[in-house]
Amino acid sequence: MKNQTEITKAFNVIKQAMVDDQPEVQGSYAHSWHCNIAMAVYDATSDDISAEAALTIGNEAATMFMKRCFDVDTK
């Protein structure tokens, strides 16, 4: 259980850093995470969809991840 406690502490530190740095603002710590997640999803999408659709999917996925994992809104 010690590892779980350390992981929880680490996530709480990251979450607080994101909250303190205004996650809704472009260029913030949370926004940089959002962009990296969104681009990873974008890069992994099929060539069968448009770049605009891939970008939309990537941003939606990143927004959901950031809310679920860190409870921050990066829309």
Image (spheres, rainbow, N blue to C red):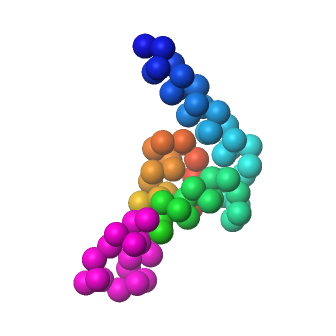
Left or right of 13 on screen, residue 52: left
> How far across and down, in percent of the image, does residue 42 sit?
41, 72
Q: Residue placed at 71% from the left, 63% from the top? A: 27
Left or right of 26 on screen, residue 4: left
| Rendered position, 31 above or below 2 | below
Q: Residue placed at 66% from the left, 46% from the top? A: 18
Instruction: Please report the bounds of the magenta region as a residue range.
Output: 40-59
Q: If the image is split into quadrants, where does the C terminus sit?
A: bottom right
Residue pushed farthest top?
A: 1
> How far across and down, in percent of the image, does residue 33 sit?
57, 56
> How far across and down, in percent of the image, does residue 58 sit?
43, 67
Q: If the image is split into quadrants, where does the N terminus sit?
A: top left
Q: Residue placed at 53% from the left, 62% from the top? A: 36
| Rendered position, 16 above or below 49 | above
Left or right of 52 on screen, residue 72: right
Residue 35's image quarter?
Answer: bottom right
| Magenta stretch, main secondary structure class | helix
Residue 60 is at least partly visible in this image: no
> How far across and down, in percent of the image, does residue 62 sit?
47, 59
Q: Residue placed at 74% from the left, 49% from the top? A: 21
Residue pushed farthest left?
A: 48
On whether residue 52 falls in the magenta region, the answer is yes
